[in-house]
Amino acid sequence: MQRPRLPYQIIDGVPRCVSINPDRLRENLKFRALNGDVVQATFPKSGTHWLMYITHLILREGQPITSYEEFTKEWRFLEYIDVKDWTSSLPLRTFATHLPLDKRTMTGEGKYVYLARNPWDVCVSFYNMATNISSLEFQDGTFEDLVDAFVSGNFGYGEYFEHVAAAYALREQPNVFFTTYEELKKNTREVVLRLAYFLGEKYGLALEKDEVSLQKMLERSQPDYMRAVVVLDLSGNGNPQWEEVLSGKKITCKEGYEGDENKYSFVRSGKVGGWKDYFTPDLLRRMENRILEAEKESCFMDLWKDIRVEAIRTMQNSE
């Protein structure tokens, strides 16, 4: 019996997500950030919506976001949605992408935000999404299947270790804001203020001078609050940004939001350390072998020294 594999398509010789329109991707790959543009790059399931949500709360000067439709109309996902001549009602245009940061396509005028998450938790988060949503054709996949795909880097989003290494190498650039999911979770207030100043001094000053507004923003960006807002209607109803991407496809969830198989909440647990409930010693060993290879090219895994020590200890205790 053939084991389930995460599907992907080949576009111009490169593995890409199955939901991408090839012609749109080719057009959007020409995109170059202008003055007033913020491009947020993440490997999938690294906190994409969380950080974009915080960015929008900053730009909205604390005004709450009440629905996913309200949220998505003010940003564009470069791989999926037309960006030509797009204007935003927010002070800055915001874009998201799962494409890696590339110095050759970055501009001096644009601002670039990168959020990195430890590879163990990325695997868990991606597994929970892939086994939930029908479009990924992986609902019967096992966690072992997912880890195998992850360490081989072959399921449509590029190779995780290369993705993070590329951004890590650019982290000192003045127009790059680099942080980790774990740091954002642990020191949310400090990271939010640093991001606000990066977006524009006036945003940082406004938050620093108004502790009440800052605390409200921190409350509204917590997983328990966001879970009810960042909910995608998979039928495309009421969401013109995603209607074309979803049209003609009957996509459902095994565990839909509030029991509705047509609704998917991008926020699940939002915690650090979920990997401990999924990784066996053997799977931890496979991940460690890939990390040892990645270390020959970049030292970015030092970001998660403590988690790695715990993973190695778990492996050794099983021997």
Image: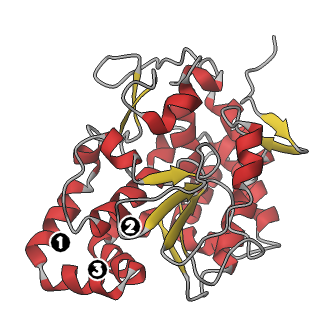
Q: Observer-nearest residue: 6 or 31?
A: 31
Label 2 vs label 3, nearer the camera: 3
SS type, badge 2: helix
Q: What kind of residue is marked 2? A: Leu
The answer to which quarter of the image holds residue 92 is bottom left
Residue 97 to residue 306: above or below:
above
Residue at the image point whose x is 56% and y is 22% from the top: 247
Provide the residue designation for mark 1: 214
Provide the residue designation for mark 2: 184
Residue 44: numbered disc: none
Residue at the image point whose x is 63% and y is 84% from the top: 108
* Label 2: few (<14), some (14–19) or many (≥20) C-alpha neighbours in 10 Å: some
* Label 3: few (<14), some (14–19) or many (≥20) C-alpha neighbours in 10 Å: some
SS type, badge 3: helix
Task: Single out the residue that lies furthest toward the front.
Answer: 85
The answer to which quarter of the image holds residue 156 is top right
